[in-house]
Structure formats: structure tokens, C-alpha cells
Amino acid sequence: MNKVHRRLLAQGACGLLVAALAVAAAGCGGGSKNATSTKAAGPSLPASIGKGEGKLSLIAWEGYTQPEWVKPFQKQTGCQVTSKYAGSSDEMVTLMRQGGGQYDMVSASGDASLRLIRGGDVQPMNPALIPDFKNFIDALKAPPHNTVDGVHYGISLQWGPNTLLYNTTKVKPAPTSWKALYDPKYKGQITIPDNPIQIADAALYLMKTKPDLGITDPYELTQPQFDAAVKLLKQQRPLLKKHWSLASDEIDLFKNGDATLGASWPYQTNTLVADKVPVKDLIPAEGATGWADTWMLSSKSKHPNCAYLWTKWVSTPKVQAQQAIYFGETPANTKACAIMDQLSAGSCKQYHADAPASYFDSIKFWKTPSADCGNGQTDCMDYNAWQQAWTEIKG
Amino acid sequence: MSARVEEAGRPSWTARRRLSAAFWRRPRLRAAALLTLPVVGFVLIYLGALGVLFIAAFWALDPFTGEIVHTWNLDNFRTLWHEHTYWRIAGRTIGLAAAVTVTDVLIAFPFAYFMARVASPRMRTLLFVLVLLPLWSSYLARIYAWRLILSKDGALNWSLGGLGLPEQHLAYTNWAVWIVFSYIWLPFMILPVYAALERIPDSYIEASRDLGAKNWTTFRRVVLPLALPGVVAGSIFTFSLTLGDYITPILVGNTQFIGNVVYRNVLGLTYNLPFAAAYATVPLAVMAIYLVAARRAGAFEAL
């Protein structure tokens, strides 16, 4: 290569870089418009459900839009359902934000719902248009994760606890407390989810074991309370075999003998028991965190009538029962219990659909941590801090 | 035959000929016609994306709504600089990439040497198939296979138990990540090293011997320098692929690497794209330095 060639190449490279930066700059110019789109109260609520628009586009957890209940819905209403599965709450938030009004509804868990509400991504819904709403357990009629200042942003769907899972042949005596997950005796055999919301599990444990910290809500933590939870998790870190990212990861860990104790969902227990792995799960003495999902309506939805028809449909006892059994969770509709037992004997009890209100109260449902402590104070740690701390805990 | 006669009669034939003549007379026009599309694609998709990445690294995230705020600031880099965790993760990632590269060189060199200079043509074909066959199956399937091999009740411990040896505890450790990466990227090292070794003319080696060099001296002073560009080219693959991969650590490891932190911030928990962009500049800088060094070593002349 001679000198002239080199100079030409260098000039060419500079030209390319300038062009690239120009493209990038154009990109930033376009994006800055919607940077601050916070919306207070949405449009006025509809008083009745109109005729379906023929289409409905959903973001859902896998297993939430099974043909067993989607097909009859399409036939009955003429709303053709397309659904996209999301793998995490954060993916759901991302899809709703980046989708540009492409999606009508999302089955958001409590740690996504408040973020969607605050970001103006979802609009209020009218529960009066959902006949089965009156049959919902009281706790899910206006829960704080989807109802803000008395405004309902979406209709509750299903819920479930995060449980303590253990191998019955290897962990003796059977654990009764979350303490087992912090016990050096089980070093190298413990697994917990790879999710910053797990800090709340540590906070829940501290709430009962170190009352002088004054934790009242595991999602509303001041700096010292937060630091204590993070410290506990850092101590736990060397005991862990692995942070699991997918439910199937944890199933593998238990199946292959790599883990004998873990924080889990009922779904994993069901799968492992079906595979004849000697495991049991329990809600320990300190109580548990859990999830409660809500169908939420996008603020840019083009098919609101179909969305209301869908919400009405999935709230009916039959669909609630089908979904509860399919996923291994608890329906919001109290009338679903009888149908669950018809579909699969004993399933109502197995999935706690007949449990008293005190069972629900023992669960601290996932919600998005924010600086607002809920008591007028604004010195709590927000989700960014949780996320940063989680990276540090994992190390 | 008849087709050619017909074609000659078509009016477009002369136009085509005139066009090709014009291209021949004006090399710049020819270059423009050939390169415009790929270059535009390259600029828009690759450099454009890199530019956006770099600019986004200076933005921030609104903690309240979780939306990206387009104000210029250095907070992301400040966090990266002051927080030891990110240093540790970057160090771990670069260290692992280096370890995997060295391991692959040590395994690939003798193998490639045998393939290029010792094996019969039939044997060579067989070895090629052996090297390339794993690439036909999914990357994920192979990682999951390793998970089953290394797990506590897995194939390796079962075999060790059969031989009366103590069981290993490699599953979900950095050792496991190192083994799996070294295995997965091995073909990418063998092939360029093989290409470099195969190109060394036999006469060079004969000449070296004629001049009295012993085997080791010939290897050290003739074969190795000529094969080095191939080794460096292979190391670019193994090093950069390890630096950027986040799936293997998720599946067989128990710690985080740069890719995992970036992934967590992109599809993950806060959708903190600016922070992800800031951290993604670390492997970019490392790779830039590595490529400059590789160029010095003459790796690109072997491509």
C-alpha cells in the first residue's frame, strides 16, 4: 500500500465516521420529543362496551393466551387476537413503550404496572363494565399496584406466592423459615432468582428478624434499611450455586442435584413433582413476596372495545379456572374454585383458590420501588438504585 | 448457439456494451457502482449504530418514569469509574477472554499443525469434518449439553465415580465458563492457524534443514513466525467472541461478565439504555486496542 492510498483510505474512513455521526444525531433529534410524557388522569371512562373492532393485540406471560380460551373468545366477539410473549416485567414495559401503540393490552405484574402508570403508557379502565369484578377477592378490587388515587388502571387477573422450594431427601429437618436460604450449612446448594426485586425478599426476612430496622414494607426501603438488605444478600452470595433466570433453569438445578434449596414459584414445584423429583414447597413463617397480574389497557390502544371484551372474558370463572390450572396460580375470581375442581380434582385447594383472606394478606406483592415511601417521605430507594445494587450483589 | 445469435440481435446488447466500456474507462464510476450499496449499508447499520451507541452513553434515565432523558452528562461513566464492581466485572471478562484465547491456541496449534503438515489427504478431510461438525448443531444445544455433563449428577461425575475418582464441583463456576468457551470457539482458532500453516512452502523447511537447523530451530525460526498471523487472526475471533457473549455465563456460570450487565440494562430490568451504552464502550475500546496490536503483528495480511 503506498502513501496516496493510505491517505485516501484515511479520508474515506473520516467521511464514513462523519456520516455515521450525522445519522446518529438525526436519530437523537427525532427521539427527544416524547422524552417527558407524563400523563395525569386519562380520558373519561367509557360507560358501555361498544362493538368490537375486529382485532386485539396483546403482550402476555407465556401461557396466558392459550387457544383453549382464546379461540372461543374470537368466535364469540370477532376480535382476532394476536399475542406476543414477554419474558420479564421489564420486557413488558419496554415493549409497551417502544411498540408505538401497536399493542392494546399487557398482562403486567405489580412491579411493572406502576411504572406503566407513571410513564403514561396505560389508561384508566372502568371496572363497572366487567360483570365478574364483583366476584373478585376484595384484596384485588383496588390493589395499590394498579389503582392510584382511586383510579383503576386495569383489571386484576391472577396471583401467586414466591415459595421456598427444597429437596425433601437432602434438606432435613424440613425448613420452616427463609433463614434456610442464608444458612452456611447449605453452601453451594442454594439458588435464588436473578432479579433485583429479590432485595425485597431479604427485606421481608429482616422485617421479621431485625424489627429495630423499622421496615414496614419490603418495597419501600430507606437507605439504612436498603443497606441492611443488600448486606444480607452479599453475605448470601458465596452460598449460592447460581442465580436462576428462567424457571426451567431452577428445574434443571433441582433435577440434576446441583441445588437443594431455592426461592421459587409454584410452577417449578408442580413440574418437578410431575418428574418425580422429591421436592416440596412452603410459605415460610415470615410470609412471602408474590406476584399479582393485571390486564392493562395501552393509552394508545386502537381497539379499546375488544380490549374490554377480552378483560370481561378472562374474568369469567371458567377462563379464570383454566388459566389457574394451566399456569399453577390463583384466580382473582372466587367463583373459579368450583370449576377448577371440576377440571382437575383438588386443584382449587392446591392453588389456594379457597384460601382465606389472611393467606392473601401474608403475601407482599411485587411493586415497583420508588423514592416515594408512601408515607409522605421521599427518601426511599428507587428502582434504579435497586438495579445498581443488584449488580453489586452479584459482583 | 442460437441463444447467442438472438442476443446479439437485441438492441440492449450494444447499450450493455457501452456501459461496460464506460465502466472500464472510468474506474471511479466502476468503484462507485460496486461499492455504494454495501458502503451505505455499512454506514447506516454499523457505524450509525455505533454512533448512536456512543452518543446514548451520555444520556440519562428518568428514575420516575423510566424514560430516557436526552441531556448530556457524564454520570454513567462516573458510576462506572467509581463503582468497583464494574471494574471487577470488566477485569474478569478480559481475563477470561485472554485465558480462553491462550487455551485455544495451545489446543489448536498442534491440531492444525498435524492437519496441515502431517495428515494424509483422507485423514485431513476427516479432521476437517470433526472440527466443523459441532458448528452444524445449535450453539445453545452444545452449551446445554455441557451443563448436563458438568452438573452434580451429570455424565462427568458418573464417569469419575465409575473410575473410583472423587467427584468434581465444576458446575456453575468460572471454570465451567472457561471450559465451555474454550470448547465453543475452538474451530475459530483451528481454521486460521491451519490456513497459515498450510501456506508455508515445504521448500522453506527443506532449506532450513539444509542450512543445518535442527527441528526445534526450524519450528521456532521458520514455522512459528509464518504461522503467527494465523494465530493472531484466530485470537481475534476467540477474544472478541468471549468478550461479547452473555449467554454462556447465564447458562453455565455463576458470575457476571460485561455482556450480562449490558443485557440486563437493555432487555433487562430498568431498560437503562444509556448505562448499557456506556458500559458497552469498554469492550469496544479493548477490541480497538487489540485490533491495532493485531495489525502490528501482521494478522490482516493473512486474511
Image (tube, coloured by chain):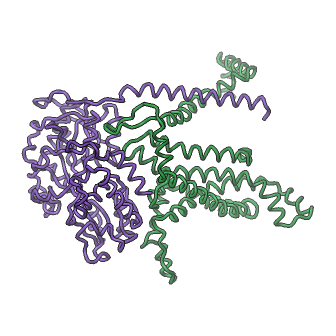
Chain colours: A purple, B green
Can the viewer see residue A294 in this picture? yes
Residue toward you, B100 or B129: B100
Image spot of residue B251 (x, y percent): 44, 59
Q: In the picture provided, is B148 more to the left or to the right than A386?
A: right
Q: Residue A144 placed where, x, y %? A: 18, 44
Along the line of sight, which residue is nearer the eye, B173 or B282? B282
Instruction: Please determine whether, in this image, residue A68 is positioned above or below residue B67.
Output: below
- Residue B227, by quadrant, is bottom right
Name the outermost residue toward the front.
A212
In terms of depth relative to the viewer, which is nearer, A123 or A225? Answer: A225
The percent coordinates of residue A123 (x first, y second) are 22, 33
* Residue A342 visible in the snapshot: no
Q: Quadrant of the N terminus of chain A?
A: top right
Residue A224 placement: quadrant: bottom left
Q: Is residue B10 above or below residue B110?
A: above
Q: Residue at x 37, y 49 (%)?
A: A387
Q: Is residue A359 left or right of residue A21?
A: left
Q: Residue B127 occupies which quadrant of the picture?
A: bottom right
Relative placement, left or right, of B77 versus A19 is left
Residue B69 screen position, x and y as percent:
39, 33
Q: Residue at x 31, y 47 (%)?
A: A381
Residue at 64% x, 55% y is B189
Relative to A145, does residue A160 appear above or below in the rendering? Answer: below
Q: Quadrant of the C terminus of chain A?
A: bottom left
What residue appears at the point 89 percent right and 58 percent down from the top-left corner?
B207
Tell how many labels: 0
